[in-house]
Amino acid sequence: MYQFKLRVMERHSKYIQVLGIRKSDSWRRRNVAFIDYFKTTRNIVVNPIIDWSKRQVLDYIKSHGVELNPCYKLYGHSGNCMMCPYLRKNQVIRTLQDPEWRAKILDALSYVGRGKISAQVRDKWLRLSKNASMTSFLGLHS
């Protein structure tokens, strides 16, 4: 995944990153601190909502009149990383139902590295691509 996300962050992200991630988003984020250091990009990372519940996030959005990102309705996730290795099964399937993203992601999977984790993610996405009917994304009945 380095070539799709981290390379861009290394080039354009300077000194401090502010992320909207929560510990409950995935098991991999359970040990993330409020303020952290990201070795790969050598940036200080601030995670202001790291300990928030989903309810707290939704309450904040509602009380401050923030429009909900339309990607949540379409894909079940924020859309900030369409090929995120941490997406849940249903999120991968919903993402792959979008004809535009499906083609781009399936093409990109051919460039994924040979490391164990990269191979697992690639295989998961390829396996789930067989379950992703595009007709449901388009609102058509199969």
Image (cartoon, grey):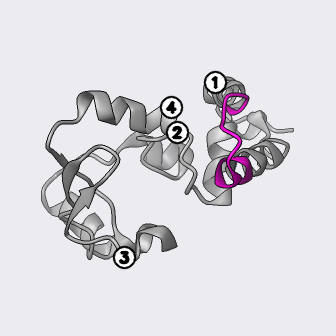
Q: Name the residue under label 1.
A: 104
From the viewer's perspective, tell me whether residue 97 is left or right of residue 2: right
The amino acid type, in three-letter code, at marker 4 is: Gln
The amino acid type, in three-letter code, at marker 3 is: Asn
| Disc 2 versus disc 4: nearer the observer | 4
Which mark sits nearer the N-terminus, 2 or 1? 2
Q: Mark 2 points at which residue?
A: 82
The amino acid type, in three-letter code, at marker 2 is: Met
Residue 47 percent across, percent down from the top left: 22, 62
Q: Mark 1 and mark 2 in contact (Cβ < 8 Å)? A: yes
Identify the mark at residue 3; answer none if there is no mark: 4
> What element does badge 1 sit on?
helix
Which mark sits nearer the N-terminus, 3 or 4? 4
> What element does badge 2 sit on?
loop
Which mark sits nearer the N-terminus, 2 or 3? 3
The amino acid type, in three-letter code, at marker 1 is: Lys
Q: Mark 3 points at which residue?
A: 31
As for residue 118 lying within the magenta part, the answer is yes
Quote the CA–CA distance across marks 2 and 1. 10 Å
